[in-house]
Image (spheres, rainbow, N blue to C red):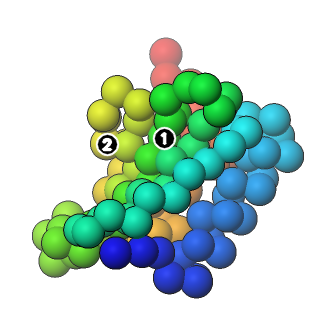
Amino acid sequence: MSFDRLELREILNLYGRKVAAGEWRDYAIDCLKERAVFSVFRRTSEVPMYRIEKDPRLARRQGAYSVITASGLILKRGHDLARVISVLDRSSLRVVG
């Protein structure tokens, strides 16, 4: 399983913006048997801050794409990659108080 060219372009566009902002530093792509994972790191020696996962087995239910934190919390899941990864954009994050 892997990301296709359009999916990678969408993810790498977000990654480029976050690197330019100094928030992210490194990434890894894992192509596993049943899912593809794009992991984002603040530092190379750390565990990933976020994982963007594509799991086609979930496509008909909750959606094939998900954004998962280092602690395993699913921030967003859905059928449209752009909408799912938008949860990581600074402009869409807001303080709740």
- Which quadrant of the view contains residue 53? bottom left
**Does residue 69 appear in the picture of this structure?**
yes
- Secondary structure of the residue carrying numbered label 1: strand
Frontmost of labels 2 and 1 is 1
Residue 41 higher or lower than 88, as above or below: above
The amino acid on which the numbered mark 1 sits, given as a three-letter code, is Tyr
Residue found 40% across the figure and 66% down from its top: 31
Return the residue at label 2.
74
Q: Position of residue 45 (x, y in %)?
A: 61, 26
From the viewer's perspective, tell me whether residue 90 is left or right of residue 66: right
Q: How many marks?
A: 2
From the viewer's perspective, tell me whether residue 23 is left or right of residue 77: right
Residue found 34% across the figure and 27% down from its top: 71
Return the residue at label 1.
50
From the viewer's perspective, tell me whether residue 55 is left or right of residue 70: left
Q: Residue furthest right?
A: 20
Q: Position of residue 83 (x, y in %)?
A: 48, 65
Label 1: how many Cα within 10 Å (few below 14, some 14–19, many 20+): many
Q: Nearer the viewer, residue 96 or 39?
A: 39
Q: Position of residue 61 (x, y in %)?
A: 14, 70
Q: Residue furthest bottom?
A: 5
Label 2: how many Cα within 10 Å (few below 14, some 14–19, many 20+): some
Residue 54 higher or lower than 47, as above or below: below
**Does residue 65 appear in the picture of this structure?**
no
The amino acid on which the numbered mark 2 sits, given as a three-letter code, is Ile
Residue 38 higher or lower than 60, as above or below: above
Mark 2 → mark 1, Cα distance in angstroms: 10 Å
Q: Position of residue 80 (x, y in %)?
A: 41, 73
Residue found 48% across the figure and 41% down from its top: 50
Q: Nearer the viewer, residue 1 or 58?
A: 1
Which labelled disc corresponds to residue 10? Answer: none
Residue found 52% across the figure and 34% down from its top: 49
